[in-house]
Amino acid sequence: MASFSAILVGTDGSETASAAVGHAVTLAHELGARLVIVSAFEPVARERLRAEALEAPTDVQWMIGAREDVLALLESAAERATAAGVTEVATFARQGDAADAIIDVAEEQGCDLIVVGNRGMAGARRFLLGSVPNKVSHHAPCSVLIVRTS
């Protein structure tokens, strides 16, 4: 069986990502591995952020935010990991594409496993991965665990 010393998980706050974080936390705790949590954000003008946040449904308003919102999401995921007994947790907020952020941080941090959710495809689309897990699985510098979340 492979031994993993550094596990990376990407999160965007969605249910799929939360399930992936849960699996990564469990693995990191059981293996005594370092957990690296990554989230990406796109820069948006403050005026546009305020206007869009006011118009969005309350359950998706968290998605409309700048780097500060991503930092809060990462802090919450890190607290979840620490509460579960993971002793070494690092977080990274990166501007740009989520898959690129995951791949780049995995390389920079020497991760040997990336955990991502499958994005909950159903019906005929169940044979297609979401764009992030698809890109990560094809370009990752290490093993990838795709968590079935649907």
Image (spheres, rainbow, N blue to C red):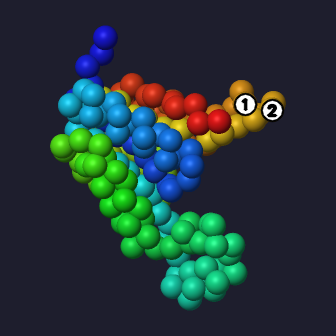
Residue 98 spot, x, y in % from top left? 49, 51
Question: Quick check: can you spot residue 30?
Answer: yes
* Residue at image point 51% right, 46% down: 17
Vertical comparison of 108 with 111: above or below: below
Closer to the camera in the image, 108 or 66: 66
Residue that lies at the very extreme toward the right in this rendered image: 124
* Residue at image point 50% right, 66% down: 42
Q: Quadrant of the N terminus?
A: top left
* Residue position marked by numbered label 2 in the rendering: 123
Closer to the camera in the image, 140 or 83: 83
Residue 45 spot, x, y in % from top left? 52, 82
Residue 126: give its label: 1
Picture quarter containing residue 122?
Answer: top right
In the image, 78: left or right of 126? left
Question: Quick check: can you spot residue 135?
Answer: no
Vertical comparison of 37 with 117: above or below: below
Q: Amino acid at mark 1?
A: Arg
In the image, 14: left or right of 121? left
* Residue at image point 47% right, 63% down: 41
Q: Quadrant of the C terminus?
A: top right
Closer to the camera in the image, 57 or 107: 57
Q: Are marks 2 and 1 in contact (CB under 8 Å)?
A: yes
Real-space Cα separation, disc 2 to disc 1, in angstroms? 6 Å
* Residue at image point 57% right, 49% down: 15
* Number of residues whose C-alpha sits closer than 10 Å to that of mark 1, classed few (under 14), some (14–19) or many (20 or more): few
Q: Amino acid at mark 2?
A: Gly
* Number of residues whose C-alpha sits closer than 10 Å to that of mark 2, classed few (under 14), some (14–19) or many (20 or more): few
Picture quarter containing residue 133?
Answer: top right
Closer to the camera in the image, 139 or 119: 119
Helix, strand or loop at label 1? It is helix
Helix, strand or loop at label 2? It is helix
